[in-house]
Amino acid sequence: MKIGNFSTTNTTLFGVNRAELLWLNTHDFLPAKPVQGAHCIALKAAEFEQLAQNRTIGGGFDIDDQLVKDFATEGFTGIAMFIGDKLIGMTLFSTETLPARYNKLGDISNGLDIAIPPGTRCMFKAVVLPEFRGKRLHSAMVRFAIDHFGKDIVHTIVAACCASNKEFLASCKNQGFERVGKFSEYCLMSKSFYRLPKPIDSVLGEPSDDEDRAIVLRKAA
């Protein structure tokens, strides 16, 4: 299971990338049962960098130097899941703005910035190693993240997902996420043209004119 520019199930047809914006009220989260033998930790920047320096781990989870740098400077939060000493899953969240490079749905696209208001986090990376999939481990990481943030501090989680990534969409739906917007990037002769949704009220998950508390998708700089 992968999302964002880490997805292996991108939709690219004649230079068109289509995706959906998923929205979750943390108070409506539907958690899976605890996974026996698995435990999660919240990663600090130094711990994340240490994981990246391990080539076996860093390669398996698509951790590069840019992500390590941004983790420290952009205020990202990481949740890592282990069984024993083995890292089997990781989920990353951003605050304020998610740079477009983490929301690219194809190799030729520029991606989109996602601006998010206080009380909201954007889940932009979710990876579970193939041999551990199908056990709702991603749901367990999201549950840990919500507890870590605190429901009264973070009331909303959003994610952008390729429309063809049925596995991830099904997982999010089972957790209580709702589809609240669709967007597309059309790539023609190295130029991008966008179809963007209206701003989404971060509390209600509905189109909004109040950008002070809205989730806004913007063209890449």
Image (tube, helix red, strand yellow):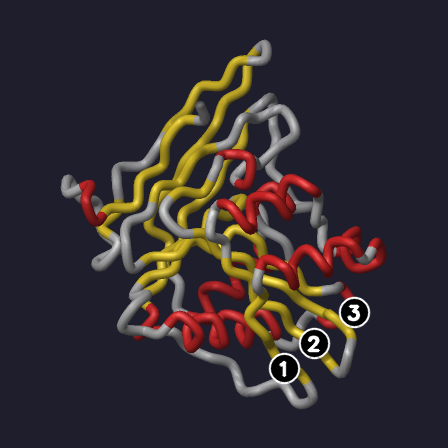
Residue 131 circle label: 3
Q: Nearer the viewer, residue 146 or 209?
A: 146
Residue indicated by mark 1: 39
Query: Image point 68% across, 64% down: which residue?
Result: 128
Query: Image point 47% across, 75% down: which residue?
Result: 143
Q: Nearer the viewer, mark 3 or mark 2?
A: 2
Q: Amino acid at mark 1?
A: His
Task: State the residue lying farthest toward the front.
Answer: 46
Please identify the quarter of the rendering in which residue 90 is found: bottom right
Q: Distance of mark 3 from mark 1, alpha carbons?
A: 17 Å
Q: Amino acid at mark 2?
A: Phe
- Left or right: residue 71 versus residue 129 is left
Q: Quadrant of the N terminus?
A: bottom right
Q: Nearer the viewer, residue 191 or 102?
A: 102
Q: Quadrant of the C terminus?
A: top left
Residue 145 locus on image (x, y percent): 47, 70
Label 2 Cα crowd, 10 Å radius (few <14 / some 14-19 / many 20+): some
Question: Of callouts 3 and 2, which one flags the residue occurring earlier in the amino acid sequence?
Answer: 2
Q: Nearer the viewer, residue 165 or 109?
A: 109
Q: Amino acid at mark 3?
A: Glu
Query: Image point 54% across, 86% down: which residue?
Result: 33
Q: Distance of mark 3 from mark 2, alpha carbons?
A: 13 Å
Indicate the secondary structure of the residue bearing disc 2: strand
Residue 76 circle label: none
- Left or right: residue 9 versus residue 56 is left
Indicate the secondary structure of the residue bearing disc 1: strand
Label 3 Cα crowd, 10 Å radius (few <14 / some 14-19 / many 20+): few
Q: Report if the CB atoms under discs 1 and 2 are less than 8 Å apart.
A: yes
Q: Distance of mark 1 from mark 2, alpha carbons?
A: 5 Å
Residue 82 circle label: 2
